[in-house]
Image (cartoon, grey):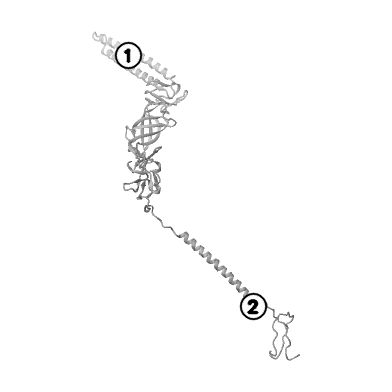
Amino acid sequence: MGTNPEHLPEADAPQKDAVTWIGRDRPPFERASEPHVAQPPRGPILLADTAGTQRKWLIRGIALAVVLAVAITLWITHHSKPALTALADKTQAPVISVMIPTLKSVTSSVTFSGGIAARYDMPIGNDGDTGRVTAVYVEAGDHVRRGQMLAKLDDSVVIPQVNRLSASLEQARAQAELSQAEYKRALGVAAAGALSAEDIEKRRATAVTDGANVKVAAAQLAESEARLRRTRITAPIDGVVLTRKAEVGQIANPGGEALFRVASGGEVEMRGQLAEQDLAQVKVGDAATVYLTGLPRAFTGHVRLLGAIIDPQTRLGEIRIALTPDPALRPGAFARGSVVIGKAQRPVVPQTAVLADTTGSYVFIVNAQGKAERRAVHTADTGDDGIVIASGIVGTERVVTTAGGFLRDGEPVQVASGGAVGESH
């Protein structure tokens, strides 16, 4: 072993074992360290990684700046508002079409519903003794005269009673006549003294008693005859039979269900219910029109009666319309009625001229200053020729016909050439 270290192998040559050389210029002894693992050279490789990282960050920064610029541009575009120009501030006023409404004769009326009924509906039943119906002579719808027989009850018991009492009356009359004759003869011989005063008084008492028996028999016969008459159900008035409940074989009790209902004179009327606020506008004698379901023609009449009270539950009052008798006016039929309460001239405008919002209906008119003016209106009716205005305009205004929804109150407008249309009244 020499004092100088031998030539060392090349640094990049692979070595199998780590060897420590001791020389003059090294410490005499150095503890062996852990096996050293060769690391790859860092000089050129480190420079390459640093350049790649810088390029990546540069690209990311540029992309982030582009995204921020686009986002700021979009935000400014979305939130910026263009300058608004009021419609009234435009240099050129909108051109519109106007018209002067036509006037139409409008009839104001109130309507109600109800039913047809007989003006005087008279129930007819058995007011005598209980009896069995043996015959019925009329049907519903028949016209009857006063005293005409409608039905007959069993009289097999009453007739013999009448005959017996009639015979008793004849017998009582004969006895009364005999007693009266004897009393007269006694008075004739009283002056001659043939009979005592006592005998004459007895004959007088007998004549009076027999005369009273005649009256009793006559009363009994009259009672029996009245019972016999009650077995004949007759019409008390002239009229039309509305209903018939009597049937042959039926037992008719006094105070029971009516066997017949007769309309006095055939008079009919409509009975309806009218709203409280409308009742105050109707007067007795006002003309009325009644319509029946399924019939195209109308029936005319007049108000005959108005209810004296208002129902506190329904807030309705009764109204009755007198009608001319007609075969089509059958009691019980459903009907609709209307009463005319007034007539007036009302302006009529096109349907496109009337607008509506939360405050109600309105139209736009052009005032004397050439500006659009909003007018609140109340409509009365709608027809083929337009909408009838009840209040709000009088018919001399220039009404905007279309595009009123694009106008503002007080906005200057320009009327289209040709002037107002519909000026004829």
Residue 274: tell me if it is visible: yes
Residue drawn at x 35%, y 34% is 339
Name which quarter of the figure residue 402 lies in: top left
Callouts 2 and 1 close, C-beta under 8 Å: no
Q: Give the residue number, with chain letter if any, for mark 1.
A: 176
Residue 354 percent across, percent down from the top left: 39, 44
- Which mark lies nearer to you, 2 or 1? 2
Residue drawn at x 38%, y 36% is 111
Residue 103 percent across, percent down from the top left: 34, 38
**Residue lying farthest front?**
417
Name which quarter of the figure residue 270 lies in: top left
| Quadrant position of the N terminus in the picture | bottom right
Q: Give the residue number, with chain letter if any, for mark 2.
A: 43
Depth check, front residue: 269 or 52: 52
Secondary element type, mark 2: helix
| Quadrant position of the C terminus in the picture | top left
Q: Earlier in the sequence, mark 2 or mark 1?
A: 2
Residue 230 percent across, percent down from the top left: 40, 22
- What amino acid is found at the position of numbered circle 1 in the picture? Ala
Residue 110 percent across, percent down from the top left: 36, 37
Q: Which mark is residue 245?
A: none
**Residue lying farthest left?**
191
Q: Specify whether 340 is left or right of 21.
A: left
Name which quarter of the figure residue 4 lies in: bottom right
Residue drawn at x 46%, y 60% is 79
- What amino acid is found at the position of numbered circle 2 in the picture? Gly
Depth check, front residue: 169 or 239: 239
Secondary element type, mark 1: helix
Q: Is residue 104 above or below residue 175?
A: below
Count numbered badges in the picture. 2
Depth check, front residue: 315 or 248: 315
